Image (cartoon, rainbow, N blue to C red):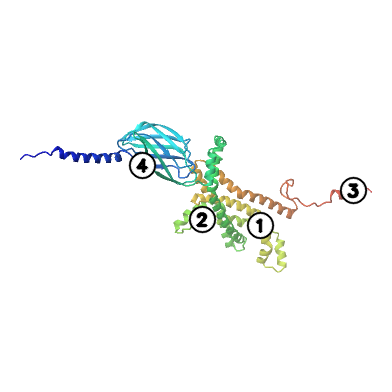
Amino acid sequence: MTMRSPRPGRRLPVLLVLAALVALLAPAAAFGLSQADTKVTIDQTTGGQATRFTFSTVTPGGETVLGMDFVFPKGTDVSSATVDAVTLVGLNRSDLTVKAVSNGEVLHVIFAPSVEPSSTLRVVLHGVVTPVTGGDLTLQGTYTNQAGAQPLPALTFRQTAPTMTERIRYWLDNQAWVAAWNKVPILNGFFKPQLIVQSVPLLFYGWLLSIGLIAVAYPLAIPIGLATAFLKMSKVPPLRWIASAYINVIRGTPLFLQIYIAFFGLPLIGLQLPDIPLGMTVLAINSAAYMAEIFRAGIQSINKGQFEAASSLGMTYWQAMQYVIIPQTVRRVLPTMTSEFILLFKDTALLSAVGIFELMMNSKNSAANAGNVTAYTVAAVYYLIITIPLINWVQKLEARLALSETGQTIANPRKRGELRPPATGPSAAAQADIAGQIQS
């Protein structure tokens, strides 16, 4: 049995239908970048600074890409932008020669050679300064093939608005005097303007924590130190031995060692305490040992006649201490107590070794991230804000106490505003009158 082939007239409509389908589908497949294969990434999440955009896509089959126009959001500066481009076909990677021309917020890019169809294309745009407003922004544009300009898929990226500190830092980056300043190695290493502006707010909260630590530890050390001073002067030998042992051990070992024992030794015996309260406790215990000796020396410096006078008025020992001895002692030891406050405030930096984010720990992290020690310089200024006024106050207080007790100051009397002892002899006019009377 022989099979007959279909008549040519019957095959013609089928061919026409297939040709029409191919004609309809071919343009859709040949032209246009896929939204799924096209993406953009950025290296800066804060607006207002130079940002690197990495654009990647896969060119459609049958299309040769000649160039691209990238249209950035309003307020973008592309005047200093540079462009690199590479293609990947299979395992073959090729660098493209790129010509870039900027016009407002538009960056016109021409590839040489042109990008082949079905190639993976990556375009890197360097130095694009994004708007300071931040927010959800859109990168648009077109690409050019043999048929003309075709639209790029809209690509969205997000940036946050810079803080005032960051805006000042960006402004400093563009100043000529800052560039000249940073060319000097010692100035760039210790006093870099951009890092000073950045470090001031970063270290502020660490400075507040340091003040909070000392604000709790120092008042806690005063009653402990006063009680230890009374134990040291007690007539009961075991009490004296306990106080002496405590004072000698604390004063004879570094505070750094005491911090390590508290933070790493106590957990070994099952005692877990929060870091900040434990740090305050260690500082208070350390300072109390020094305060005990300060109070003891102050109490023993009071003349024994004060006790006898209080006893003659019918006061008990503790009444005499409360109303007569302690007020005079506090007045005498106040400068030394203030010096101890300054030392303890500086010693809060040792808590950075156990992970408490006080001033020193924050400056250490900032310096490590920047690769520059300017943050330590800013930390020193924060410490000096507290210590220098207190040092000057102690000097004036010592001068006043010396004047009230001896009638003479311990500082240079020629210094402006310095306290001076009152005149004890007759004035010059009185001496002249006396001399005239003697001669007559």
Q: Are marks 3 and 4 in contact (CB under 8 Å)?
A: no
Question: Dot 3 lies on which element?
Answer: helix
Q: Are marks 1 and 4 in contact (CB under 8 Å)?
A: no
| Mark 2 lies on residue | 276
- C-alpha separation, residue under disc 3 versus residue under disc 1: 47 Å
| Mark 4 lies on residue | 38
Mark 1 or 4: the one toward you: 4
Q: Earlier in the sequence, mark 3 or mark 4?
A: 4
Q: Are marks 3 and 2 in contact (CB under 8 Å)?
A: no
Q: Earlier in the sequence, mark 1 or mark 4?
A: 4
| Mark 1 lies on residue | 298
* Image: 90 above or below 439: above
Q: Earlier in the sequence, mark 2 or mark 1?
A: 2
Question: Looking at numbered disc 3 in the image, what kind of residue is underneath it?
Answer: Ala
- C-alpha separation, residue under disc 4 versus residue under disc 2: 50 Å
Q: Earlier in the sequence, mark 4 or mark 2?
A: 4
